[in-house]
Image: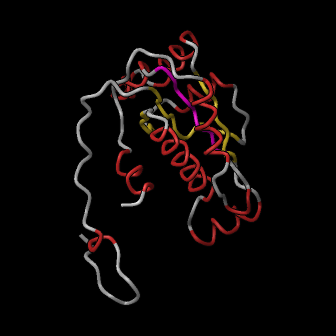
Amino acid sequence: MSPFIKLAAQRRSVRRYQDRAVERQKIVSCLEAARLAPSACNGQPWRFRVFAEEFTRRELGRIAFSGIYRSNGFAARAPVLVVALVKAAGLLPRIAGKLQDKHYPLIDLGIACEHFVLQAVELGLGTCWLGWFNQRGVARLLGCSRGLRPAIILSLGYPAGNEAPSPPRLALEEIAGFDSAPYSSR
């Protein structure tokens, strides 16, 4: 098994964190990994806001995870919350997206966030992707302009341990086929 496959296999959604600060250099390393991600037309339609100070992190958690979003309230107890924002698509990705029925900035943001979380695993940190949060409230908190909106919140910290094992994954033969070979559509 290659080192990368081992790293990918270690990545899981962490919902309990140690009460321990994350070193700024580790956060910067994760952001640098995200910065290096590819994007359509090199648009780099992502921006990241890091909340590591207790007061600002708690305020973000209160706004993001209250009311109908409280099921993700565990994230407010993470030592770091990272808001991943998506910029409006440039002209070429916007036209291509209309023709292909795809929103390329969100795809690009997904790639950048995955770079972030894989770097976190390599550094001994845990993360959880959160898409269910009060986006309007977070946008107001951040003072987002019209062309920028919060899309994902990543919780980040040292795992507290005792995480449930990753759910079983489908076999490779069930998700991939070569050339015209059939595969299961299960």
What residue is shown at x 34% (from left), y 29% (from top)?
15
Q: In which quarter of the image is residue 23?
A: top right
Please give the range of residues in magenta.
Answer: 79-86
Nearest the eye: 113 or 73: 113
Vertical placement of residue 94 versus 51, above or below: below
Query: With respect to residue 163, does 101 lie above or below?
Result: below
Residue 33 on the magenta span: no
In the displayed structure, does residue 37 sit left or right of residue 14?
A: right
72 relative position to 174: left or right: right
The location of residue 19, given as percent across then percent down, is: 40, 14
Answer with the quarter of the image where residue 55 lies. top right
Q: Farthest residue in the bottom direction?
A: 180
Residue 141 location (% of width, % of height) = 62, 21
Residue 83 lies in the magenta-colored region: yes
**Is 90 or 177 nearer to us in this picture?**
177
Q: Which of 91 and 126 is in front in this view?
A: 126
- Image height of 36 relative to 133, above or below: below
Quadrant containing the C terminus in the rendered view: bottom left
Horizontally, is 154 left or right of 10 in the view?
Answer: right
